[in-house]
Amino acid sequence: MTLMATEAHAETDIRRHELAAFLRSRRERISPEQVGLPRGRRRRTPGLRREEVAQLSAVGVTWYTWLEQARPIQVSPQVLDALAGALLLDPTERTHLFALAAQTDPHPETPCPTVSPALRALLDQLEPVPAAVQNSRYDFLAHNRTFGRLFCDLDALPREDRNSLWLAFTNNDFRAAVPDLPEVLRSLAGKLRAAMAEHLAEPAWKALLHRLQTASPEFREIWARHEVVDQASRTKLIRNAHVGLLRLEHTNLWLGPAAGPRLVTYVPVDEASRAGVERLQELVLAEEEAARLGSRPAQADEALAVA
């Protein structure tokens, strides 16, 4: 066995033992009453029994026992998802679970630990300026109301589809909002390639790349050029479906290391664009009020019908 293979084997072994210890500690802190199970008279085990976790997760008792014993067995993202639910893991614990197992979370819609309540409040306070928090993989982690309707109806999409590249290459509404689409597609693919250099072996990055290559021949063709593009800010033209053409200055404000999450803002560069984003905010607020009252106001219907 080569030195590299030996080191990889040792790392895998460490991960298994860390995962086993983490699962055991989470199991022992949960009372039967918390998950709707009777305590019973004879219970010497702190927290839940292994068979109770297996029952709640719909997995075999023997298999789960082996998992806690750090046996060399395979665990799928779906099983990890079930275990996270059974063990009542919070978002940080869930992220840690999938990291230990070196698996991609199949349901990343759980609140992201990097988006604090204060940051969410800041997004709201920036309105009507469209703003969002985006990670280095170009997933939208959070956004304010005007950003949610800037390119398309972001809130209507599954969490896994809220990614700049996925929208640019596959979503018709998003693509229609970008007048210079060919240049934007080339730029986004180049930015992803530049960012991915530090994440080549990470499952979430590989899953995004595979998904894009499978869904879009256009992406495959551009990706094959091996172009890289930096993160320079610039003025963008956006053809919003409700308020028309907007000229917005796109700016990145990193919230930590340059490879980490960043605050993305779209500041109007002229009075017409400022009036446009203000009108967009009014439309969203009118929709929210209509939803609260159980009906959509006529002016919101009329405005949202404008293409």
Image (cartoon, rainbow, N blue to C red):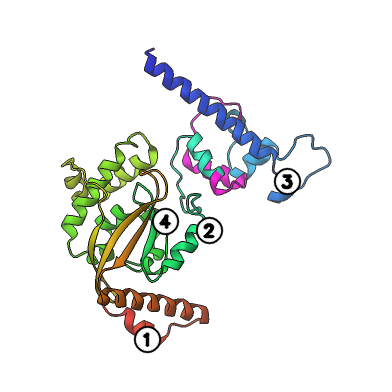
Q: Residue at x 49, y 43 (%)?
A: 78
Query: Could you say where residue 230 lies in the image, as x and y percent from the top left?
Result: 24, 46
Is residue 151 visible from the viewing direction of this image?
no
Kind of residue sitting beneath label 4: Arg
Q: From the top left corner, tell me how far across and down residue 192 is, in percent.
A: 27, 45
Picture disc at residue 32:
3
Q: Residue 41 appears in which quarter of the rendering?
A: top right
Is residue 100 highlighted in magenta?
Answer: no
Left/right placement of residue 195 relative to residue 133 reads left
Q: Secondary structure at mark 1?
A: helix
Residue 178 seen: yes
- Whether 166 is drawn above or below 78: the answer is below
Closer to viewer: mark 3 or mark 2: 2
Give the distance between the C-alpha atoms of the residues marked 2 and 4, in whole angstroms.
19 Å
Amino acid of disc 2: Pro
Q: Residues within 10 Å of mark 4 (few under 14, many from 20)?
A: some
Mark 4 and mark 1 lie on one chain; the one further toward the N terminus is 4
Q: Calculate the distance from the C-alpha at mark 3 to the C-alpha at mark 1.
A: 53 Å
- CA gap, disc 3 and disc 2: 31 Å
Look at the picture and state if 52 lies above or below 285: above
Q: Which residue matches tag 1?
A: 299
- For marks 3 and 1, the one nearer the N-term is 3
The answer to whether the residue labelled 4 contacts the one labelled 1, judged by CB atoms less than 8 Å apart, is no
First in sequence: mark 1 vs mark 2: 2
> What amino acid type should be assigned to the residue bearing mark 1?
Gln
Residue 117, disc: 2
Q: Relative to 150, does residue 96 appear above or below in the rendering?
A: above
x%, y% of residue 122? 46, 62
Nearer the observer, 78 or 254: 254
Q: Which residue is mark 4?
A: 159
Residue 94 found in image quarter: top right
